[in-house]
Image (spheres, rainbow, N blue to C red):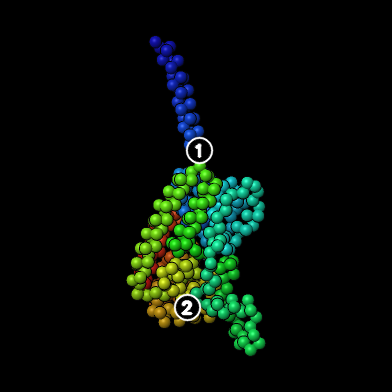
C-alpha cells in the first residue's frame, strides 16, 4: 500500500509537468511590438491586447525631442516585429536606427507618413518666411527685418509632428497600426480587427466629448510651452496664439516674449500652459507679469493620475483647458 502511493507521486508529478508544458505550447509567444512614445505604446496595447508585448522607448518624464536611446535600448528595439513611431523629426535618432536594421525587418508604422503636416508656428509669421525660402523675394520686396528668420520648426523636420493629440488623427494612426499587427501576425487578424473597432469607437466618443465641451469655451485662444496642441486646436476651433519655445530647447527671443505678452493682454488669457517634460520657469515669469497662472498640459503622458492611458490623458488635458478657458 505504502509503496503504491510513493510510486503514484512521481507519476502525478510527471502528468502535471506534461499538462503545464501542453498549456505553455498552446499559448503562442506574444508579438514583440515597440513604440517610441507612451501614447503609441497605449495604442499598441489597446489594439494588440494580450497578443502583444509592448516596449515603450521614451520613458515618461522625458521629452521625445531631447531623448537619446542607449545602445542597450536599441538592441532590444531591434527584436521588435512591429515598430511604431511618430516620424517627421520627433525622434531625431530614428532615421539612424532604421538604417542599422537587418532582415527580417520589423513592420514599420511612421504615424506622420501621408499626413499633411501643419507648417506654421503659432504667433510667428511662418507662412511668409516659408514662402520666402521657396521663392527668393522679388527685387522690390521689402527685406524681412533682422531676427525674423527665427520661428522655423525645422527641428521638427517636415512639419509639426504632434498629430496624436488630435483624436481623429489618432484613429487614423490606430487603423494603420492594426494593419501592421495583422501583417506581422496574420493568425490573430480577427482579434486585431475587433480591438480596432472597439478602440476607434472609444476615440470617437472622446472626440465627441471634447467637441461638445470646447464648444462652450469662452476664451478660444491659448498660449502653450511649445506647439504640441496645434492639431488639437485646429480640430476644435481653438487658437494657439503663442508658444514659449518654437522648438524645445530654443529659448524665446525678447521679441517673441513681447508677442506673447501682447497676445495674453489682447485675448484676456489668464492661464499659460506649461508641460511636465520641461521647465515652467519662463511660463511662471510671463504669468506673474500678466497676472495669469500656469497650468500643465501633457502631450506625452506617463504621469499620475492618467498614467499611460491616452484616453485618460486627453480627459485630463480637456479638464485643464476647461479650467483656463471655460
Ligand atoms: Zn513636441
Q: Which residue is mark 1?
A: 28
Q: Residue at x 48, y 34 (%)?
A: 26
Question: From the viewer's perspective, is residue 311 above or below residue 245?
Answer: above
Instruction: Please provide percent x and percent y for residue 169.
Output: 47, 62
Q: Confirm or reject: label 1 Cβ below 8 Å from ligand 1.
A: no
Helix, strand or loop for disc 1: loop
Residue receiving disc 2: 260
Looking at the rendered structure, the secondary structure element under dot 2 is helix
Residue 171 seen in the figure: yes
C-alpha distance separating marks 1 and 2: 56 Å
Quarter of the view holding residue 301: bottom left
Residue sitting at x 57%, y 79%: 128
Q: Is residue 300 visible?
A: no
The verdict on label 2 being within 8 Å of ligand 1 is: no
Q: Residue furthest top?
A: 1
Q: Relative to 153, does residue 2 appear above or below in the rendering?
A: above
Q: Residue at x 60, y 57 (%)?
A: 94
Query: Is 163 in front, or is 247?
Result: 163
Tell me which label, 1 or 2, sits earlier in the chain: 1
Locate the C terminus and report the quarter of the image it occupies.
Answer: bottom left
The quadrant of the rendering that contains the N terminus is top left
User: Looking at the rendered structure, which numbered label has been put on residue 296?
Assistant: none
- Towards the viewer: 225 or 201: 201
Q: Position of residue 207 (x, y in %)?
A: 39, 62
Q: Is residue 144 left or right of residue 123?
A: right
Residue 113, placed above or below residue 324 = above
Q: Residues within 10 Å of mark 2 (few under 14, many from 20)?
A: many
Amino acid at each position: 500500500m505504502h509503496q503504491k502511493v510513493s510510486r503514484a507521486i512521481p507519476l502525478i508529478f510527471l502528468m502535471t509537468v506534461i499538462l503545464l508544458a501542453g498549456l505553455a505550447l498552446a499559448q503562442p509567444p506574444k508579438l514583440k511590438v515597440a513604440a517610441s512614445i507612451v501614447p503609441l505604446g497605449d495604442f499598441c496595447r489597446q489594439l494588440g491586447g494580450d497578443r502583444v508585448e509592448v516596449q515603450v522607448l521614451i520613458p515618461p518624464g522625458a521629452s521625445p525631442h531631447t531623448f537619446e536611446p542607449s545602445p542597450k535600448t536599441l538592441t532590444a528595439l531591434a527584436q521588435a516585429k512591429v515598430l511604431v513611431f511618430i516620424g517627421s523629426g520627433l525622434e531625431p535618432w530614428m532615421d539612424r536606427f532604421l538604417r542599422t536594421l537587418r532582415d527580417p525587418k520589423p513592420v514599420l508604422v511612421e504615424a506622420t507618413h501621408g499626413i499633411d503636416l501643419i507648417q506654421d508656428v503659432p504667433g510667428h509669421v511662418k507662412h511668409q518666411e516659408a514662402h520666402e525660402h521657396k521663392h527668393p523675394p522679388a527685387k522690390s520686396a521689402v527685406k524681412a527685418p533682422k531676427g525674423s528668420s527665427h520661428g522655423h520648426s525645422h527641428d521638427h523636420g517636415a512639419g509639426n509632428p504632434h498629430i496624436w493629440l488630435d483624436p481623429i488623427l489618432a484613429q487614423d494612426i490606430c487603423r494603420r497600426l492594426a494593419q501592421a499587427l495583422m501583417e506581422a501576425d496574420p493568425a490573430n487578424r480577427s482579434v486585431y480587427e475587433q480591438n480596432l473597432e472597439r478602440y476607434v469607437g472609444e476615440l470617437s466618443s472622446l472626440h465627441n466629448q471634447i467637441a461638445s465641451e470646447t464648444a462652450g469655451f469662452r476664451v478660444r485662444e491659448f498660449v502653450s510651452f511649445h506647439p504640441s496642441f496645434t492639431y488639437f486646436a485646429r480640430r476644435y476651433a481653438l487658437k494657439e496664439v503663442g508658444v514659449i519655445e518654437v522648438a524645445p530647447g530654443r529659448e524665446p527671443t525678447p521679441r517673441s516674449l513681447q508677442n506673447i505678452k501682447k497676445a495674453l493682454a489682447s485675448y484676456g488669457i489668464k492661464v499659460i500652459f506649461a508641460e511636465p517634460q520641461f521647465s515652467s520657469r519662463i511660463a511662471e515669469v510671463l504669468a506673474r507679469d500678466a497676472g495669469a497662472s500656469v497650468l500643465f498640459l501633457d502631450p506625452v503622458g506617463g504621469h499620475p493620475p492618467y498614467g499611460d492611458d491616452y484616453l485618460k490623458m486627453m480627459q485630463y488635458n480637456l479638464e485643464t483647458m476647461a479650467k483656463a478657458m471655460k
